[in-house]
Amino acid sequence: MPDKIVLLPDNIANQIAAGEVIQRPASAVKELLENAVDAGATEIKLIIVDAGKTLLQVVDNGSGMSETDARMCFERHATSKIKSIEDLFHIKTMGFRGEALASIAAVAQVELKSKRAEDDAGTLLEIENSTVLRQEPVAVPNGTSIAMKNLFFNIPARRNFLKSNAAEMRHIVDEFTRVAMSFPNILFTLTSNGQQLFHLEKGTLKQRVVQLLGNHYNAKMVTVKDDTDYLNIYGFTGKPETAKKTRGDQYFFVNNRFIKSAYLNHAVMNAYQEMIPSDSFPMYVLFIEIDPEQVDVNVHPTKQEIKFEDEKIVYAFVQAAVKHALAQFSITPTLDFNLDASIQNLPSISKPFTSDQQETAAASPIYKGFTQQHQAHFIERPSSSELKHWKEFYEPVKKEEALFEYEKTTPQIFSAPKSKSGFTVDEHTDLAQVLNTYILYPTETSFLLINQQAAHERVLYQQMSGAIEGNPIATQSSMFPPTLEMSPSDAVILNELLPYFKVLGFLIEPFGTNTFVIQGTPADLETGNEKQIVDFTIEQYKHFNTEIKISNREKLVRSLARQRAIKTGTRLTEREMRQLLTDLFECTPFNIAPDGNPTYLEFKQEQIERMFGK
């Protein structure tokens, strides 16, 4: 019987390894940008075509590579970052595993151009499917240019797994943001399909944060800086008013490496306790400098999950640093009893108070109310001339005109036949609101306890789903169109969703870089709230949590329904309750909200009697 175990060829082994390291174009962006940083570059350019599926290129002015190094860098486990096992405990570079370039060469067509400052000519290398096709000298500037073309060309199943260009571009922008934020002393540019999305000049950390996350944070960040013998913490955290309902702009870096840590995030949330609502999340960009021996970064190929030697002490330092920063900059409400010096320069104080002015002031009702007895609540009787037309307010209106006005302004919903649900709401139905959250609806043998927010979400979801299917919602033009300034990554999302927003009644148009104008909104949307609705919807969309794969438009409809729905704690009039229940009972289904939770609970008579022991 022949032996079964065989040694895999290098190209197949590399393709298998690439599945862990290069999952999508954004994974390659991270690896190539980090390599450019490790090469000591001061200028790094990222060029993207078709969200990295056609071309992904990184150009830097770093140290470059020799002819031998250029060839060796594509071998598996070939690295210049470590030489012994002890070096793993002193890692200060971004990369060290020696897998990224080998993985990229296994799943893409790669062209490398590199030159050192001391060399007369550079090296050109072309690799496809882990095989070197061409290597020759070439005239190039100092540094390295590596172009990755036709990603997953030899793995069709993996290429088909990729999302839309807009979705993949969002991931690329996220990875670019994380690397660019770590190194504000490096110039970064990002060009997509010939259009420059980012041009980040060298500057301070605050300038880089504002460039990447948006100008609205410029005056709403608090500086965090705390140096200890064990670690140093620095960066910025947002003032409480910047907190959002979903996890948004939250970044942790350890030794300039972006990490994901629910444990440290909990430390920041504890620092904000009682300053923001429990369902809100603060903005923060925090850097931790710690001895590399106290950290293990070799946990996962992406290197975004790390382990600390002592997690509890890091937690305590992070929480204390954020608390100290918020207290130092007087974020908590305080009372200031010091007189503002500018008040002394007001005309009412600086100018002389003449005798004529004193007499006029003393004769005024306001002066009497403060200086004479029994005048504080005295109401001066109006003159007879002001009341002579009072009868005109009570002129009888013709019966026909009154009936016409009533029919014109009052929706005729109360005399409708039974709805699809079998429940009917008319003018004789006794409704009650409980805790400004639930609506009691009685039937002959039971009552329904209806969650007003879940019910309204179901109604809005059905209306917007109908709009997506071919019945667009009417749009009313904004008299004073508000401007919406987005972060670059959010601008990519909004551009992708503009056609769906239009069908749902929102007319939003691009207005310069990362800026949009809301030209129109749904006819039933209250004006003045449109910016918050769009902003929160994008946040909800970004962090949409579901185990089921659903389309982008479905995520948008659910997110928008949640943002527009009547919130828990909102007082409703009897008329509003009737209209809501009438709309709910016409939905199919009417008993389940878009997120799968029930819209109501039914309590039957026999069930209630059993609860009372009868």
Image (spheres, rainbow, N blue to C red):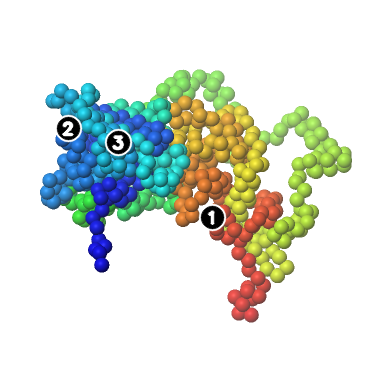
Q: Nearer the viewer, mark 3 or mark 1?
A: 3
Left-right relation of 496 to 328:
right
In the image shown, does 413 or 395 lie closer to the viewer? Answer: 413
Q: Give the residue type at disc 1.
A: Asp
Up/down of 499 relative to 228, above or below: above
Q: Nearer the viewer, mark 1 or mark 2?
A: 2
Badges 3 and 1: C-beta atoms under 8 Å apart? no
Q: Give the residue type at disc 2.
A: Glu
Left-right relation of 158 to 585:
left
- Mark 2–mark 3 Cα distance, whole angstroms, equals 16 Å
Residue 574, how many percent across, how many down? 68, 53
Residue 602 shows up from this direction: yes
- Mark 1–mark 2 Cα distance, whole angstroms, equals 57 Å
**Dot 2, how many residues are within 10 Å of its Cα: few (below 14), some (14-19), or many (20+)?**
many
**Quarter of the image holding residue 188?**
top left
Left-right relation of 59 to 487:
left
In the image shown, does 336 or 412 lie closer to the viewer? Answer: 412
Name the quadrant of the C terminus. bottom right
**Residue at left offset 58%, top offset 24%:** 360
Residue 178, how many percent across, how many down? 32, 39
**Residue at left offset 54%, top offset 55%:** 595
Assign a secondary structure to mark 3: strand
Q: Which residue is denoted by mark 1 in the rendering?
A: 595
Query: Mark 1 or mark 2: which comes first in sequence?
Result: 2
Q: Which residue is denoted by mark 3 in the rendering?
A: 110
Q: Give the residue type at disc 3.
A: Val
Residue 314 shows up from this direction: no
- Mark 3–mark 1 Cα distance, whole angstroms, equals 44 Å
Left-right relation of 498 to 422:
left
